Image (tube, helix red, strand yellow):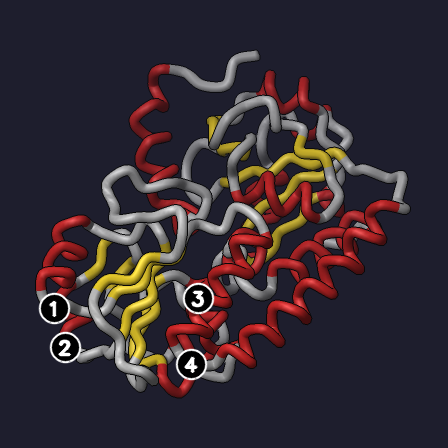
């Protein structure tokens, strides 16, 4: 099965680095750790927080700490209040000057934030920096919530949130366990240029499996360009994609025009599901809700 051609190699490299807020990718040139890492000393109760990574920002607001967030990166657009605060750049293209000008007591950053020179500069200035690992499972999400709660001295709230999410997780797993229907889903990313599909070790693959679906592209690794031949051979029942802002309908229409789609079981436009990118693949506190919404979409044939 032909997944890519030499002509699109350069494009693929650029698109994979820029799309979906890089939630699905490991950064090889960023300061990272398997467990939450803290550099610099943090005041007992930080009053001014800079949040880098949409999921981290959601956690802070969910814990009732939104009034302490004084700045965030451009992937932080939920809840609505997060859109109105000062931005310090895209999570992989941060501005040291922008961050320092806010004089934060602590910075929460997703693993893979960068560039390295900015992180090094902040570290040299002893700016308190907490690195939170990429969420590859709900267990990692719970650890990130607990870490933020610990640093912000709201352990009771963080434990309550974790327990609530675990309860939702248990309910979802119970429903899936008794459901014999396992829809065949293909995640297609087409914000510009050549469509890309999500294979194993991607955020899209994880959310499909969490919702009880089968990722028909699970045999490939990471993201690969989609060919007409491959699409027909995979024959998905549902196409899943993402949109930003108000671009849901445009995303659905773009996917519906992919060559070869009419020869698959997902040929009807009602079998194209488009969901907000941060909700679907951000892996924050709304992840289980996203999985439930995804299940509802393919069960009801809604988009």
Label 1 sits on a secondary structure element that is helix
Quickly name the residue at label 4.
153
Q: Residue at x 39, y 78 (%)?
A: 152
Circle 1 packing at 10 Å, graded few (<14), some (14-19), many (20+), is: few
Disc 2 or disc 4, which is closer to the eye?
Answer: 4
Mark 3 vs 1, N-terminal side:
1
Image x and y of residue 129, in percent: 26, 65
Quick check: 3 above or below 213? above
Mark 4 vs 1, N-terminal side:
1
Quickly name the residue at label 3.
147
Q: Do the numbered discs 3 and 1 sit on residues whose CB atoms are within 8 Å? A: no
Q: Nearer the viewer, residue 98 or 144?
A: 144
Image x and y of residue 194, in percent: 45, 31
Quickly name the residue at label 2.
101
Quick check: 128 above or below 157? above
Q: CA distance from mark 2 to mark 4?
A: 25 Å
């Amino acid at each position: 099965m032909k997944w890519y051609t030499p002509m699109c190699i350069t494009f693929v490299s650029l698109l994979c680095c820029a799309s979906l807020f890089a939630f699905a990718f490991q950064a090889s040139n960023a300061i990272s750790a398997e467990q939450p890492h803290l550099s610099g000393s943090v005041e007992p109760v930080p009053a001014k927080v800079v949040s880098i990574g949409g999921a981290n920002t959601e956690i802070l607001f969910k814990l009732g700490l939104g009034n302490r967030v004084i700045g965030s990166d451009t992937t932080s657009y939920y809840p609505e209040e997060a859109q109105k605060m000062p931005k310090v750049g895209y999570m992989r293209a941060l501005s040291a000057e922008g961050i320092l000008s806010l004089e934060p007591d602590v910075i929460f950053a997703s693993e893979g934030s960068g560039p390295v020179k900015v992180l090094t500069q902040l570290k040299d200035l002893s700016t308190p920096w907490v690195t939170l690992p990429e969420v590859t499972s709900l267990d990692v999400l719970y650890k990130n919530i607990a870490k933020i709660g610990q640093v912000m001295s709201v352990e009771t709230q963080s434990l309550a949130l974790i327990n609530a999410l675990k309860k939702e997780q248990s309910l979802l797993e119970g429903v899936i366990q008794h459901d014999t229907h396992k829809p065949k889903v293909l995640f297609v990313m087409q914000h510009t240029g050549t469509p890309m599909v999500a294979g194993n070790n991607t955020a899209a693959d994880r959310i499909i499996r969490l919702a009880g679906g089968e990722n028909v592209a699970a045999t490939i690794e990471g993201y690969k360009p989609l060919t007409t031949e491959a699409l027909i051979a995979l024959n998905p029942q549902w196409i899943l994609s993402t949109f930003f802002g108000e671009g849901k309908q445009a995303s659905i229409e773009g996917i519906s025009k992919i060559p070869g789609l009419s020869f698959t079981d997902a040929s009807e436009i009602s079998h194209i599901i488009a969901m907000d990118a941060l909700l679907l693949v951000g892996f924050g506190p709304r992840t289980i809700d996203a999985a439930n919404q995804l299940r509802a979409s393919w069960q009801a044939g809604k988009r």
